[in-house]
Image (cartoon, helix red, strand yellow):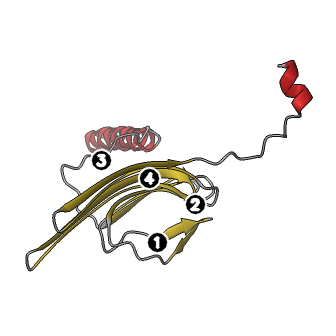
Amino acid sequence: MGRTSRLGLRLLKVYVFAAASLLIVFTLSAFQNQAQRTRFEVIDVERMNIVEKDGKVRIVLSNKARFPGLMVKGEDNPYPRDVAGIAFINEDGTEYGTLTTQTRRATGDFGAYSGVRWGSFGQGQGVGMLYDDDTASARQVSSSRMRPRRKRPACSSAARAES
């Protein structure tokens, strides 16, 4: 074997070793855990939907223009609410709570509204707090409305006497 063919054989061995090493490195890096999180300092959005893995909306953070209507059974029903805030959606796709705020300043007129509400839509149960200030006449309200889910059986006078 000549000197030139030995040099060519060595270069071929180096090339095959380098190519095989790169192939192994790229293959192993493809299967590496991609759990690195993207980090943002500031995100500017008009509306953000937080969803479950199956795509169901659970929380909506929104500005005034993009705030959802009334969410019932997964559908956004048009409902005028001139507020910005957070809407909480249950597993059914029905809204069960909000945290909202609104401020109005126009030609010397001032109005402010803030509210938090939790409850079961359609069942008459709820707890809420409200701040409403319209042209310097402030009103603060805290309310709750609870209705039992089922009626208790009527107690007879004999049952009351035993207890």
**Mark 3 sits on what residue?**
38
- The quarter of the picture where residue 8 lies is top left
Left or right: 82 with respect to 125? left
Give the secondary structure at mark 2. Answer: loop
Which tag, 4 or 3, sits closer to the chain's start? Answer: 3
> Label 1 amino acid?
Gly
The Cα–Cα distance between marks 3 and 2, rounded to whole angstroms, is: 31 Å
Q: Quadrant of the C terminus?
A: top right
Q: What element carries label 1?
A: loop
Label 3: few (<14), some or many (≥20) within 10 Å? few
Residue hosting label 1: 69
For mark 3, give the secondary structure. loop
The residue to which callout 2 is attached is 94
Q: Which residue is drawn at 27% across and 62% down?
A: 113
Marked residue nearer the N-terminal end (1 or 3): 3
On the question of residue 133 being in view, the answer is yes
User: With 56 as the anchor, is 97 left or right in this view?
Assistant: left
Q: Rate crowding at label 2 as few (under 14), some (14 to 19) or many (20 or more) other CA atoms within 10 Å.
A: many
Q: Do the residues labelled 1 and 4 touch (CB within 8 Å)?
A: no
Residue in the picture at 8% in, 80% down:
107
User: Which residue is at 46% across, 76% downward?
Assistant: 79
Real-space Cα separation, disc 1 to disc 2, in angstroms? 11 Å
Residue type at mark 4?
Arg
In three-dimensional space, the C-alpha distance between marks 1 and 4, rounded to whole angstroms, equals 15 Å
Q: Nearer the viewer, mark 4 or mark 3?
A: 4
